[in-house]
Amino acid sequence: MKRRNLLKALASLPLLGAWRAAAAAPPKDAKGVEELQRNWKTLLAANATVPLPTEPLKLADEEWRKRLDSAQFYVLRKEGTERGGTSPLNDEKRPGVFVCAGCGLPLFTSEMKYESFTGWPSFFTTIPGVFARKKDFMLILPRTEYHCVRCGGHHGHVFDDGPPPTRQRWCNNGVALRFIPKTGAA
Ligand SMILES: [Zn+2]
């Protein structure tokens, strides 16, 4: 079954339909997306201190090994991919900000997240200027891989089958993210 048909089938179930309606929907137009990007700090906890994209963090592999657990190191520093459906952040729906697990740079807000049913946390846009992209050919067909602009950590791949208006699906490894709820410490 195609993903779109599956979504339609799921939405037609009364209970799941109600759940989907409760989840935040993407803005209707590009202007709405720009507003989310411009106002991302309104989702940041008052007591959170976060770095700027313009403060690079470069560390040797052995330093990263000390800071990160093995799953984080494999994804962020070795361009690995976590097993789908394993991240608790798939179900994270509270208001807040998702930051890089390597360097703390804010990358996405809860308002940019949507349920893609892929098993990985998915976003239809990002906080501006926080990722660098490059094509990879690991699955023969080119995919666009993206890295944190501050620490160079690998986060995931961006596809063009996301919801309107952006049609983007930023498919992010959950272990590469840390969630800061707007209400403060998790
Ligand atoms: Zn980073």
Image (cartoon, helix red, strand yellow):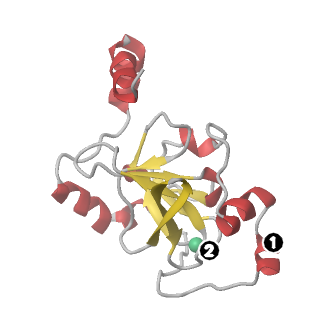
Quick one: SS at disc 2? Answer: loop
Kind of residue indicated by mark 2: Cys
Mark 2 residue CB less than 8 A from any atom of ligand 1: yes
User: 131 left or right of 76?
Assistant: left
- Closer to the camera in the image, 37 or 71: 71
Quick one: SS at disc 1? Answer: helix
- Between the residue at mark 2 and the residue at mark 1, the CA separation in whole angstroms equals 13 Å
Image coords of residue 20 (percent x, y):
37, 28
**Relative vertical location of residue 110 with respect to residue 69 in this rendering, above or below:** above
Which badge, 2 or 1, is on the more N-terminal residue? 1
Kind of residue indicated by mark 1: Arg
**Relative vertical location of residue 4 with respect to residue 10 in this rendering, above or below:** below
User: 91 left or right of 129?
Assistant: right
- Closer to the camera in the image, 91 or 84: 84
Identity of the residue drawn at 65% across and 70% down: 102
Q: Say whether residue 162 is visible.
A: yes
Q: Say whether residue 45 is visible.
A: no
Circle 2 or circle 1, nearest the eye? 1
User: 15 left or right of 25?
Assistant: right
- Within the displayed image, which quadrant is ligand 1 positioned in? bottom right
Q: Quadrant location of the N terminus?
A: top left
Q: Which residue is tagged 2? A: 103
Determine which of the numbered discs, if any, sits on residue 43 in the image.
none
Asked whether disc 2 touches disc 1, contact meaning CB atoms under 8 Å apart, the reply is no
Q: Which residue is tagged 1? A: 65
